[in-house]
Amino acid sequence: MDENGTGRVVLVGAPLGNVGDASVRLREVLAGADVVAAEDTRRLTRLARDLGITVGGRIVSYFEGNEERRTPDLVEALRGGAVVAVVTDGGMPSVSDPGYRLVRAALDAGFPVTAAPGPSAVTTALALSGLPSDRFCFEGFLPRSGSGRRSRLRELAAEPRTLVFFEAPHRITGMLEDLAGVFGTERDAAVCRELTKTYEEIRRGPLGELAAWSAEAGPRGEITVVVAGAPSGPAERPADADLRAAVAEREAAGVTRRDAIQAVADAYGLRKREVYELVHATG
């Protein structure tokens, strides 16, 4: 229980893979919390063992599948004065992981929320990417379907800030191919795999090259993708032949002609109809 007798939520930043990154506060919070809501209780048990600590409070599972159902129970624990710690498999809770619903519910009910900050795959990958990091936006996971993914990427094609994504290993090749198709094969990017772990790997290069590498290598593990933003300011209008070639390049990468035309129009600030007519003028 909090020393003031008031319940509170503590978001705990867990190591991404290297247990040596665990903070002193993480140890203190996990050992002293009344309730620990863990994305994976088995991983929490392993982490506690590796850290040489004992989790003294009640451990409950708290993941995407039960987050909505379990949040009211955790708020009730707060009403009883409990300190509720939230810990995910790695990184900060609420960042594409469980936590947001409890944060919102706790704040709405008048309970304080604080954090024991720790590692984040977003900022770690951004720093290692070699791409501009003064301005960036985090997009999390893209839609799973190819059409939904490409639609979202078209909306982001002109975004000038560096972009950070999460992706699952079995979808990474398709994602990189769609990125290359919508953003262009020459847009710089970095694929960051297994950050802080034994087999950490950072692949940097143009999207076209990264898509080809992924198709051949089949990368596994936790993956974060960082992509350079679109060039600032309106791009100079290419010659008609270059616009047609840009559409053809995206089509060759697997993007539909309709989506390729839209992506090229967005990239150069042109009307979609203008690019469409250029492409279809040659049949």
Image: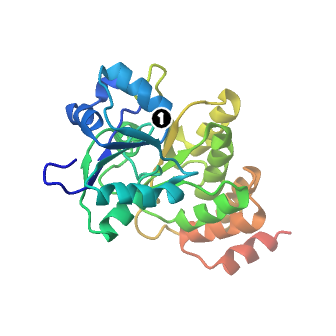
**Color style of the picture:** rainbow
Q: Mark 1: few, some, or many residues within 10 Å (few <14, many ≥20)?
A: some
* Residue 50 percent across, percent down from the top left: 36, 20
The residue lying at 24 percent from left, 37 percent from top is 32
Q: Is residue 194 visible?
A: no
Q: Which quadrant of the figure has residue 129?
A: top left
Q: Residue 166: percent from the left, percent from the top?
A: 52, 46
Q: Secondary structure at mark 1?
A: helix
At 72% from the left and 50% from the top, the residue drawn is 253
- Residue position for label 1: 41
Q: Nearer the viewer, residue 79 or 102?
A: 79
- Which amino acid does the dot numbered 1 rest on? Thr
Residue situated furthest front in the rendering: 80
Look at 61% across and 48% down and name the residue there.
185
Q: Is residue 5 above or below residue 173?
A: below
Q: Quadrant of residue 100?
A: bottom left
Horizontal and vertical percent position of residue 200: 46, 25
Q: Quadrant of the C terminus?
A: bottom right
Q: 132 or 142: which is nearer to us?
A: 142
Q: State the residue lying farthest toward the left.
A: 4
Residue at (31, 32) in percent of width and height? 56
